[in-house]
Image (cartoon, grey):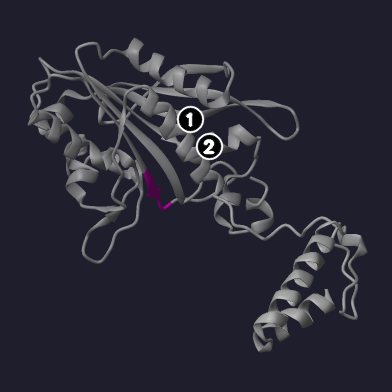
């Protein structure tokens, strides 16, 4: 290696005849070195390097587990014929409440305790704030196809936190409007989603509930295994048939059109996917936790 380096350095200063002879010598040295194994090459450095040792894995970033599962959920719904519309994170009172059958003074507004800016805008407490916009867009279309939309978004609520509740969380809203919209179709869509997402037929049950913007309202609960091995039913997907008042507000005749909607708690999806017991881990920014995914 030293001789080769010396010859290459001197090459520009040689006469044409000398260059020819030196070039042949360089070619011979390169051929000789190509047959030499790395262990036979001695380093001029004072520190020997074992080139056969495995390399050091670079410290690369990873996608947040919620982002990973959001993309998985979107792929499942895309394969079911839905398109994606991103939710806004700050909205007005009309889209947040009034357009969803929460008139001013309605007691159900208390169930959606949320934050408010000094300009009276609201960091969204649910991705349903997009419903009126999307339904109005559909009302202006030729309506030749069923409306199928999912709305992923980040939500904020003023509430106490615990192992399964957080003030900041993610939802995936879904809206379906069409001639075949029914509770049976709704349950079929949700069951197809959760079974595909988890990769097996996860135990679930449907129970009635109340939300002002659906009638009737349903909740899908799935079975959650606690760290101690005990099982618990965890609310995962509130849903229901879109309320006639919501359709009217979006300029759709409820006698001609019907639909259903849902809002999946994405954080809880991830908890169940990985058997996690505390929803608050997602937002601590602890790399020891996040790098596991």
Instruction: Give percent across and percent down for residue 50.
Output: 88, 64
**Label 1 SS:** strand
Image marks 2 and 1: residues in contact by CB distance under 8 Å: yes
Give neighbour class at mark 1: few <14, some 14-19, many 20+ (Cα, 10 Å): many
Query: Does residue 182 sit above or below 66 in this rendering?
Result: above
Instruction: Give percent across and percent down for residue 244.
Output: 16, 23
Give neighbour class at mark 2: few <14, some 14-19, many 20+ (Cα, 10 Å): many
Residue in the image at 53% along x and 37% along y:
268
Work out whether residue 250 or residue 71 is closer to the camera in this orientation and state it: 71
Dot 2 corresponds to which residue?
Answer: 268
Q: How many marks on residues?
A: 2
Quadrant the C terminus occupies = top right
Instruction: Give percent across and percent down for residue 36.
Output: 87, 59
Report the side of 264 relative to 276 (left or right). left
Is residue 156 rendered magenta in the image?
yes
Residue in the image at 53% along x and 50% along y:
161
Instruction: Give percent across and percent down for residue 286.
Output: 63, 58
**Label 2 SS:** helix
Is residue 292 rendered magenta in the image?
no
Report the side of 140 relative to 222 (left or right). left
Q: CA distance from mark 2 to mark 1?
A: 7 Å
Work out whether residue 189 or residue 25 is closer to the camera in this orientation and state it: 25
Q: Which residues are magenta?
A: 153-158
Mark closest to the chain's N terminus, 2 or 1:
1
Report the side of 137 relative to 285 (left or right). left
Dot 1 corresponds to which residue?
Answer: 236
Quadrant the N terminus occupies = bottom right
């Amino acid at each position: 290696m030293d001789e080769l380096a010396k010859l290459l350095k001197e090459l520009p200063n040689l006469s044409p005849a000398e260059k020819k002879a030196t070039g042949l010598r360089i070619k011979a040295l390169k051929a000789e070195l190509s047959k030499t194994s790395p262990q036979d090459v001695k380093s001029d450095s004072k520190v020997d390097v074992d080139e056969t040792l495995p390399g050091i894995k670079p410290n690369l970033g990873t996608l947040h587990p919620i982002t990973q599962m959001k993309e998985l959920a979107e792929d499942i719904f895309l394969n079911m014929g839905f398109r994606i519309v991103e939710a806004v994170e700050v909205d007005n009172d009309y889209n947040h409440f009034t357009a969803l059958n929460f008139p001013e003074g309605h007691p159900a507004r208390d169930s959606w305790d949320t934050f408010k800016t000094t300009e009276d805008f609201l960091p969204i407490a649910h991705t349903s704030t997009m419903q009126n916009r999307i339904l109005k867009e559909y009302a202006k279309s030729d309506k030749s196809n069923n409306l199928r939309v999912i709305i992923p978004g980040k939500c904020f609520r003023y509430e106490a936190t615990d192992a399964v509740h957080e003030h900041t969380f993610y939802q995936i809203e879904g809206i379906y409007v069409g001639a075949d919209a029914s509770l049976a179709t709704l349950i079929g869509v949700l069951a197809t989603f959760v079974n595909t997402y988890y990769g097996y037929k996860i135990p679930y049950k449907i129970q009635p509930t109340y939300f002002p913007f659906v009638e009737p309202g349903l909740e899908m609960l799935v079975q959650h295994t606690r760290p101690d091995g005990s099982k618990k039913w965890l609310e995962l997907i509130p849903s229901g048939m879109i309320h006639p008042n919501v359709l009217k507000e979006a300029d759709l005749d409820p006698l001609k059109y019907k639909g259903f909607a849902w809002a999946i708690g994405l954080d809880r999806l991830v908890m169940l996917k990985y058997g996690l017991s505390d929803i608050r881990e997602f937002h601590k920014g602890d790399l020891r936790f996040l790098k596991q995914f």
